[in-house]
Image (tube, helix red, strand yellow):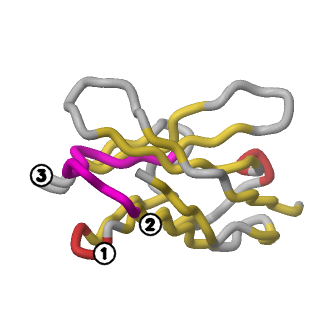
Amino acid sequence: VQLQASGGGLVQDGGSLRLSCTASGRTFSSYSMAWFRQAPGKEREFVAAITWSGGRTLYSDDVKGRFTISGDNAKNTVYLQMNKVKPEDTAVYYCADRTVPGSAYAYWGQGTLVTVSS
């Protein structure tokens, strides 16, 4: 599975940005997809996830109420709508995919950089 993330860029404090991640080369159906991020000098952290069956979503406390994850299963694409961004949201954002419930995310995109200016 190859994941291609896009949509990163420079955005002002309080602005909005939408990230996209499209999967290709699937052999097995995806169970869930997620977004993670890694800020300079910090470890990678979970941002949000969506489960295709039932459309369940999960968010980190840092982004809850500001970010929305959604997906289009027919297009093998997951989105991250980022609203009211803050400078601390600056990071490389990675999308990830897993095919087995409860397993680690096995497939990762290359990352897209989001920079929030104050």
Residue 26 picture location, percent across and down: 30, 55
Within 10 Å of disc 3 (Cα), the crowding (few <14, some 14-19, many 20+) is few
Q: Nearer the viewer, residue 29 or 37?
A: 29
Look at the numbered disc 2 and give the secondary structure of its residue. Answer: strand
Check disc 2 and report the residue beneath it: 22
Within 10 Å of disc 2 (Cα), the crowding (few <14, some 14-19, many 20+) is some
Mark 2–mark 3 distance (CA, rounded to whole Å): 18 Å
Check disc 3 and report the residue beneath it: 53
Which residue occupies 80% across, 52% down?
A: 87
Q: Magenta stretch: give its range.
A: 24-35
Which residue occupies 61% across, 69% down?
A: 6
Residue 102 appears anywhere in the view: yes
For badge 1, the amino acid type reads Lys
Mark 1–mark 3 distance (CA, rounded to whole Å): 15 Å
For badge 3, the amino acid type reads Ser
Please say if 104 is above or below 84.
above
Check disc 1 and report the residue beneath it: 75
